[in-house]
Every structure is written in C-alpha cells, then in structure tokens.
Image (cartoon, grey):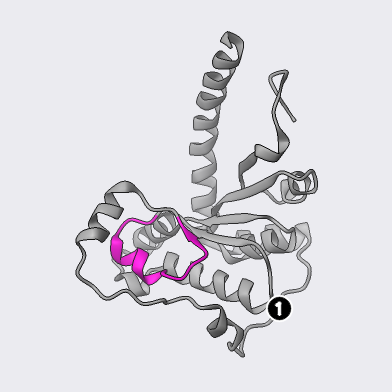
Amino acid sequence: MQLHGKELEQQKCMSNILNFYHILFSLEKEGIHCNLTLVLSFIQAVACAQAGIYLISPFVGRINDGYAVKYKKSYQPHEEPGVFLVKDVFNYFKKFDYDTITMAASLRTPESVLELSGCDRITIPPAIIQKLEKLDLPVENKLRVETAKKIENLVKMDKIDENTFRWSLNEDEIGNEKLADGIRIFARDAVKLENVIKAKLISA
C-alpha cells in the first residue's frame, strides 16, 4: 500500500472511510480492515455486514440531532433514535452471526453510554468518561448476544444490491440528510489531514 509514493505496511493499516456502497468490498478484499464511519441508517449497517466489513461506527449523537430538529423534541437516553439504531444493528448482527463489530460513536451523555452497555465497542470522549466516573447509577448489560439470538421477529435481509441500497438510504430521510452533511464535513477535514501527512512525508 502506498501514500504519496511512500510504502506503508499493510498489516498495520486500518482504513477509516465514509460509508459509500461502491467501496464496501475493495479494501477488505485486500486485507485492510475498515471502519465504516457515518453509519446513520440500518441499511448502511446491513450492507457493511454483508460485505464483511471489520467494524462500523453508528453515530448516535448525529442521529439524535436530526430527529430533534425535525420533530422539535428532546429525547431521554432510553428513547434516543440513535440508541435504538445501535441496539437494532447489534441484535441483527448477533442474531444472524455476522462478524462485523458495532462500535457506537458520537455519544453526548454518560446516560446514553450506559444504555448501550454490552455493545461490542464504544468510543467515548474524555469529558463523558469523567462524567461516567461521577455518575451514581447502576450499570447493567443492556445488549447481550444470548438475548439477540432469542428475538423471533427479526427477518434476515436478502443480498443488498446497489439499487436497493441507494433507494433504501434515500427513503431514510434523516439518515440520508445527516450522511450528506457528514460527508461534506469529513471531506473538508480529509483535505486538511492529507496536506499535513504529505508535508510530514516530504520532510521525512
């Protein structure tokens, strides 16, 4: 693998890439584990699992933001749309034996973190970790593999082709809008990061 003409050790690379259908298959086939970020809808998550993606990052806070703006409503942690999405994805993956790791991201409160205890992984900002240390609440495992296995009303989706993916994503109004917004933000940041890396490689 190369970056600006410099060889990188492939086994030490984990690519953090935006969730586009047409790149879901390529890097994993090359042996590069991928974190598909900006997962904001269920169809994205299932497409990633079907493609054998190593890890996905559903963005809890961004999903909540979209619902709060659209419906002019604030949500308690146990009823947050972002929390529901992570739980649905976790249960689906475990029910149907997908290996893709669910890593909840963009969490804004310690209570939201506790609602997702038992998730494969959770990325937590330092400020939320500090609040968790001071929180006097019982901690229980909310997500369990054995519980997911017993869910009877889950139906395994057929293989998702590109047309199905794009149409289903389009039908998810909030997920689609927040994905577009996130891509714009990530694209600007990616250009900044690439310029920093390029300067360091040239000076090395």
Along the line of sight, which residue is nearer the eye, 125 or 85?
A: 125
Residue 7 x/y as whole percent: 72, 24
Magenta residues (range): 107-122
Q: Is residue 84 left or right of residue 132?
A: right
Quadrant including the C terminus? top right
Residue 43 x/y as whole percent: 63, 64
Image: 149 above or below 34: below
Q: Residue at x 68, y 47 (%)?
A: 33
Identify residue for label 1: 156
Residue 190 x/y as whole percent: 54, 31
Residue 32 x/y as whole percent: 71, 43
Image: 149 above or below 131: below
Q: Residue at x 66, y 65 (%)?
A: 46
Along the line of sight, which residue is nearer the eye, 98 or 140?
A: 140
* Residue farthest to the top, as pictured: 203
Amino acid beneath label 1: Lys
Q: Is residue 71 left or right of residue 42?
A: left
Image: 185 above or below 143: above
